[in-house]
Image (spheres, rainbow, N blue to C red):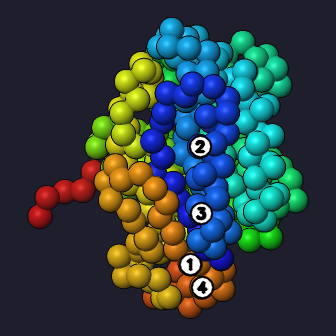
Amino acid sequence: MRIAAAAYPLDFLDDWNAYARKTRAWVEEAAGQGADLLVFPEYGRMELATLDGAEAAGDLESSLHAASRWTAEADALTDKLARAHGVHILAPSGPVFDDSTGGGVRPVNRAGLFGPGGPLGIQDKQVMTRFEREEWDVVPGGPLRVFDTTLGPMGVLICYDAEFPLLGRALMEAGVEILLVPSCTEAMAGYSRVRVGAMARALEGQCVVVHAPTVGAADWSPAVDMNTGAAAIYGPPDLGFPETGILAQGGLNAPGWVMADVDRAAIARVRRDGAVLGHAHWPESASRVRVSGDTAESP
């Protein structure tokens, strides 16, 4: 399969047609280069808040409601494009006020996965950053999910979630082979944390991880005003994969698609015959997680 990770700039949009044109152009570009899986970033749908005007987009609380109101239309557009081009698309995540998660009083951060045959389901962010919980009041949503697709079993860890190994391990134990990590990070340090987390999940899970960030300035928003990142696709640095673990990586803050060709058989092979067997040996490591209460004496 060919996987495409987006380094995606957020734009101030004049109307719905502008958003539709932008989305259509991005999908057509990747599909035209043979991509089977397209991954968009976290909070990419915050640009939908601009459809309610500068005042709404420029206010933390109003922007959540404004972006959320366009969820159904944006999902319908993504569904149509996935079907038309015969591709899988992880849509940009965005705030959603959902009555089934916390009564809809506060929004979750949600990404939807769409396939050639229709919607495949949603994934909500599990662990909120300090900004999300202390200032924006975005809340955790539904549980982790495994998406059984014709490209193989996939999971999604949204940004900060990728920094927690137990979340990744839960998906690995449930059969995931391809992990999607959409992100939105303001500074180089934030991007680096997610990048290191994504590469660590590829290492310990012996899987492919797709990192798709927002990039560039969006000074119309107090929430996503500055974005730093580079799109990349990672694997374990072992049998059948690059020695660096980097299958493909774009330039820092360079908008566009980054692509890599991935064979599912390579994942099965490295899990079976790799120089190390981190995926298989995880239970052994977990059984050794204990610290002696005795204080070692100096020689």
* Residue at the disc numbered 1: 261
**Can you name the residue that lies furthest to the left here?**
299
**Which residue position holds label 2?**
22
Q: Position of residue 217 (x, y in %)?
A: 36, 33
Q: Name the residue type under label 4.
A: Ala
Residue 187: name its quadrant.
Answer: top left
Which residue corresponds to the image point at 68% horizontal and 69% vertical from the top-left? Answer: 36
> How far apart, in angstroms, are the residues tagged by discs 3 and 1?
13 Å
**Does any portion of residue 102 appear in the rendered image?**
no
> Between disc 3 and disc 1, whose residue precedes?
3
* Residue 167 in the image, given as x and y percentages of width and height: 60, 50
- At numbered mark 1, what does the secondary structure look like: helix, strand or loop? strand
Locate residue 19 relative to residue 218 in the image: left or right: right
Label 4 neighbourhood size at 10 Å, few (<14), some (14-19), many (20+)? Answer: some
Looking at the image, tell me whether mark 3 or mark 4 is earlier in sequence order: 3
Residue farthest along the right direction in this orientation: 117
Quarter that holds the N terminus:
bottom right
Describe the element under mark 3 as helix, strand or loop: helix
Q: How many labels, in total?
A: 4
Residue at (63, 25) in percent of width and height? 15
Q: Residue at x 48, y 36 (%)?
A: 10
